[in-house]
Image (tube, coloured by chain):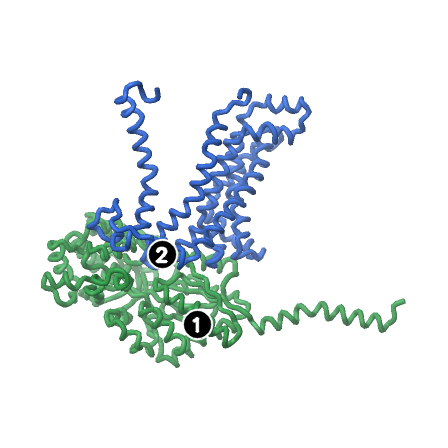
Chain colours: A blue, B green
Amino acid sequence: MVGGRRFGERVLRLYLPLGFFLVAMLFPFYWMAITSIKPNRELYSAKIMPLIVHQPTLQHYVDLLEQTNFLTWTYNTILVAVVTTVVSLVLGAMIAYPLARLNFPGAAVVAIGVAATYLVPQPLLFIPMSDVINRLGLSNTLSAVMLTYPTLLIPFCAWLLMGYFKSVPRELEEAARIDGASRFQAMLRVVLPLCTPGLLSAGIFAFTLAQNEFLYALIFLTKSDVRTVPVGAITELIRGDVFYWGQLMAAALLGSIPVALIYSFFVDYYVASLTAGSVKN
Amino acid sequence: MTTRRDFLTVSLVATGAALAPRLAGAAGKATTKSLTTVRESSFIKAFDDYFVKTLAPEYEKLTGIKVGYEAVSVGGMLTRLTTMAETKSGPEIVHTGINWPHLFDQSLVDVSDLAGEVGRKLGGWHEQVQEVVVVNKKWKALPWGNIGQLEVYRTDWFKEVGVTKFPETWEDLLAAGRLLKKKGHPFGFEIGHGFGDNHGWMYPLLWSYGGREVDRDGKTVLIDSSETAKAVDFCRRFYQETMLEDVLGWTDVNNNKAFLGEQISCTNNASSILVVAKRDFPEIAKVTDHALNPNGPKGRYHVLNAQGLGIMTYAPDQAAAKAFLRWLYDDKQMSRWLTAGDAYYAPFLHGYDNHPMWNAEPRYMPYKESLKTSRPHAWPGPVGHAASENVAKYVLVDMFAKACRGDATKDVIATAAAQLKQIYKAK
């Protein structure tokens, strides 16, 4: 039995560490949730116990939805995150596969180049990138970030997927080729299904990165109705030295729901793929 | 077969077609259809709303020109302005603050003619604002108001310890603070790496003791002086004897929260604390007041943070942008806009010294009075890139903070002097 046979052993070795991690992981969400339903009087008072809500209110949610474009920002964020994730996964896989599986001159250099591209900091890129976006006439359109986010995400996905592609035995692919599959079919039907955990990991990380990205969104999306949640919330809910904590936390909590849903949808499949073998059911 | 007549006809049509876009372009330039203004979102939402919902539609109705408004998050305006200046694209009219007209001199249109007109109509400009908006004798922005940093305090708690009028000098404030801390009402002045409430009282403290960072020439570092040492020694006592310990890690948000949470009795801030108190904490608002920064041995000072509007040089129709600013800075519009701002911005035009907006809330009056003694960051040094680097690296804040932490006065001054020499490339 996991943790030991006796109840005491299990408490000490299993439930206590598990409880500790559970509290550590969930505390930020708890804090967001209670802050979003506290009236301002409770939020500001140092005399009131901060971990409990005494007079809960939904006013911050009402203000967030009525006084800001939060629903539009959420729609924009999800649209941008989905499009950029799909584009980045497809193109990332197309880069990663040849670099991992085909022996061609310069493959190692290109692989290092991909990793190096991912490491270039955004503050170095945003001005030239902004120039390109302006020349294309894409300022203040979601296309601006849909085009620029993949510049970060494709190298990231490719780098992550290369490792997964390398872990699939060549013999499986060679067997498929002997059976008459083309290289593309072998990749599509043999390698990619075995790399599902990698694709899911890359997809989830890419989605989260696209959803949270701040600098490009700040520069390229300056009108309220095209903003994403991170930029919209910061712009309209922080004014001078006053933070609208309740609304900010409400926005953060609602904004984290899409990622939580995606994780919960894919987590079983992800774990199942991770533990599945390639030659055994 | 093509006749000569056919050839001429075809040639004329082709020439006309080739010229049409240019002619249309020229006509388009003369009839600009829209302008865009970019601004850091105001603390006073009504100030932004009045521009968007009232002033912009009025201008459109009057001229047919639609005036767009882009709000940038607090702290994001400098990034946006840098991008606009580097890529030479974006909104035509831009928000400026602190010393930005000096930083973006090359990207801003000379608006001296407009400044002259507005000044003549509205009683003239306050002299000190010119230091931050006039670059090489050219006005690079039209200021609309100052965001002052003053003392914000609890009148009821001060009365509890027998202080009925806000102390006139730093030493008197220290004495009051000692009593208040004993009563459980400490002070809370930001000494951390925030964006305004730290320099907002530290520069005035240094200046009022006669200390200066750098001379007007921008090459002579003056920080290592007995005056600075006195200011540092005072700051250490002020922190140790009157304040909450955690102010060393505070940013601009913390003192607002601590004041409204009734943890502190005095801080240095803009009028935002009172504005929020009136909205959410009316009983605290009743016992909150503002006062000028205290006097030191060498006078009384405040920090200048002039907010203005400038025109980017890449604007395709600069005349249209100027025409809009001329209309906006006309008393008929500016007066209403400032009133919508709830006296948060103290205007730099003498014509507004006795504006009715000051009557609605007398407790904002010190913000107007503070203009006379306001100086730009790093004064009397030049208001350029080095001043920005100096402020961004928190040289002054860290000097005072390290002293509060317990470091020796001469050591913290020596560190600051070395940093300043490097920043100003001084010997």
| Spot occupied by residue B390 in the image (x, y as percentages of width and height) | 34, 56
- Work out whether residue B421 can be spotted: no
Quadrant for the C terminus of chain B, please. Answer: bottom left
Quadrant for the N terminus of chain B, please. Answer: bottom right
Alpha-carbon span between mark 1 and mark 2 = 24 Å
| Spot occupied by residue B216 in the image (x, y as percentages of width and height) | 32, 65
| Spot occupied by residue B345 in the image (x, y as percentages of width and height) | 33, 68
Q: Which mark is residue B55?
A: 1
Identify the amino acid type marked 2.
Answer: Ile
Residue at x 37%, y 71% (from the top left corner): B144
What is the chain identity of the residue bearing mark 1? B
Q: Which mark is residue A201?
A: none
Q: Quadrant of residue A244?
A: bottom left
What is the chain identity of the residue bearing mark 2? A
| Spot occupied by residue B213 in the image (x, y as percentages of width and height) | 28, 59
Question: At numbered mark 2, what does the secondary structure look like: helix, strand or loop?
Answer: strand
Identify the amino acid type marked 1.
Answer: Leu
Residue position for label 2? A238
